[in-house]
Amino acid sequence: MVAVVAVAVVAALTAGCAGKSPGLDGPRVVFAEDFYLELSTRGPDGYATLYRVNGARRLGFGGGTDALNRRISWVGAITDEQYAELQGLLERHGWFAGTVSAQGEPAQRVTRGQLRWPGGSRRFKLSGDSADIDPVRDLLDGVARQRLSRDLDRLPEAGDVRYK
C-alpha cells in the first residue's frame, strides 16, 4: 500500500514537468527516491574525488585511488538544508537543463557527471575549470568532510598548547 501511494505521489509530482525544462520554465524538480547524482573529478595534480548522492539523502565519497577505481570509502547523511541547497545549485547552474560547461583549461582537470531524476537524466564529461561544477563540488566536499570531524574534534584548540 505504501509503495502504491509513493508511486502515485511521484507520478503526480512529475506529471507537471512533462515537456518542460525543469528549473527553467516549469515547476521545481522534486528529489524523489529515484534521484541520483554522481560527480567525479580528476585534477592536474592527480587529485581525484568521487561523490554519489541518492534520494535517501545519503552521500557516498571516495578520494584518491578509491575515486579512480570508482569505490566509495565513506557514506554519510545530507541534512535537509544541504539537500535543498544542492537542488538549488543544480537548477541555477544548468544541470537539469544540460547547460553545464567548462573552460577547457586546465585540460588535465576532467569532470564527469551523471544526474537522474523522475522524468529525466543527463551525463557529461568536461575538461577544465567550471563555474557550474565548482559550487556543487564545494557543497558535496563540505558534507564529505564530516568523515573527519571525529579526528578534528580530538585536536587541541589553538591557544591550548603552551610553549616554554
Image (cartoon, rainbow, N blue to C red):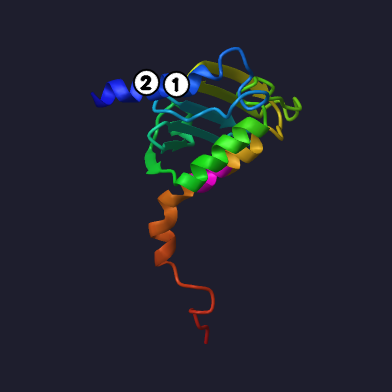
The number of discs equals 2
Question: In the rendered image, which quarter is residue 95 located in?
Answer: top right
Magenta stretch, main secondary structure, is helix
Residue located beneath label 1 in the image: 12
Query: Which label is found at residue 32?
Result: none
Give the image location of residue 133, x and y in percent: 64, 33
Question: Of 153 and 48, which appears nearest the observer?
Answer: 153
Quarter placement of the N terminus: top left
Res 153 → quadrant = bottom left
Residue drawn at 42 percent across, 31 percent down: 54
What residue is shown with label 2?
A: 8
Question: Where residue 21 sits in the image (x, y, percent)?
Answer: 64, 19
Front residue of this view, candidates 3 and 66: 3
Residue 39: x and y in percent read 53, 29
Say which residue appears at 49% left-offset and 79% top-offset.
Answer: 161
Question: Looking at numbered disc 2 in the image, what kind of residue is underneath it?
Answer: Ala
Range of residues picked out in magenta: 139-143
Amino acid carrying label 1: it is Ala
In 3D space, how far apart are the residues under numbered discs 1 and 2 (Cα atoms)?
A: 6 Å
